[in-house]
Amino acid sequence: MVIVVRKKKLLLSIGICFMLGLLYRLQNQPVVSTFALPTAYRIIMVDPGHGGIDPGRVGEQGLDEKDLNLQIALYLKTYLEQSGAYVRMTRTDDKGLYDESDTNKKRADLKKRTEKINQSEADIAISIHQNSFPQKKYKGAQVFYYEDSKEGKRLAEILQEELRSFLDPENHRQVKANDTYYLLKQTKIPMVIVECGFISNPEEERKLNDTLYQEKVAWGIYVGIMKYFNELDRGLVTGEPLLN
């Protein structure tokens, strides 16, 4: 009986020593960092242009720009959130950012969009729009940036490249600097305006009105954003503080 008890105590002591040794080894193991996407924990502002009484451009087949902007923006929001980003939007439905009492609703809308963007603490802002021109032959996505923003320029270049790759390799449009657009001038973070296509072009309007194509546009913007933050993390994107 005494032998059995001593044997149990010995086995218990051995077991305790083994567990303590294992815990010590685990505590001294190097920490392995988990994989994180470039957009993880980033704050991204997405601005679907127009809304409410302001339809924006109206296509040849009656497509309102405001509706198309919102749909693409919502797809983009989904992709970004699935990659760990925090997405804030200037609007999520067909409502403009103005009060009914505002005499100049367009101006009030732009001012409130700017305020939302500047108060968002976002890393970047993407404004979604559609282009239009009296001649129907023009087509293709194009990205605009504020001329004094180096970071905005690089973001625009990457987005233009990805939209060309995903939508139309024959689109030879280049990014365009601008110093007159209210949003670009007044925002204090890197911001671009993405003109996803020309709704004045019947063929491109048909594409833009297709759900799968809208998702494709949003995906091209999403991939561009991922590449931008990847470059930023590697120290390849540099810019001066905006002085607006």
Image (tube, rainbow, N blue to C red):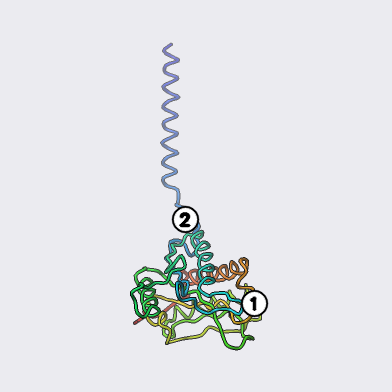
Q: Position of residue 172 (x, y in %)?
A: 62, 84
Residue 180: image quadrant is bottom left
Residue designated by label 1: 168
- Answer left or right for 113 relative to 32: left
Secondary element under disc 2, as helix, strand or loop, is loop
Residue 73 versus residue 7 in the image, above or below: below
Residue 78 versus residue 142 in the image, above or below: above
Residue 189: image quadrant is bottom left
Q: Nearer the viewer, residue 238 or 170?
A: 170
Q: Nearer the viewer, residue 3 or 169?
A: 169
Mark in front: 2 vs 1:
1
Secondary element under disc 1, as helix, strand or loop, is loop
Check residue 33 in the rendering and tell me which mark sits there, or answer none: 2
How many numbered discs, if any?
A: 2
Q: Residues within 10 Å of mark 2 (few under 14, many from 20)?
A: few
What amino acid does circle 2 point to?
Ser
Q: Earlier in the sequence, mark 2 or mark 1?
A: 2
What amino acid does circle 1 point to?
Asp
| Image quadrant where one finds the N terminus | top left
Q: Nearer the viewer, residue 186 or 34?
A: 186
Check residue 114 in the rendering and tell me which mark sits there, or answer none: none
Q: Position of residue 95 (x, y in %)?
A: 43, 69
| Image quadrant where one finds the C terminus | bottom left
Q: Residue at x 44, y 14 (%)?
A: 3
Query: Which residue sits furthest top?
Result: 1
Q: Position of residue 50 (x, y in %)?
A: 46, 75
Residue 209 versus residue 104 in the image, above or below: above
Q: Position of residue 123 (x, y in %)?
A: 41, 70
Q: Residues within 10 Å of mark 1 (few under 14, many from 20)?
A: few
Q: Mark 2 to mark 1: distance in Å?
A: 38 Å
Q: Nearer the viewer, residue 222 or 101?
A: 101
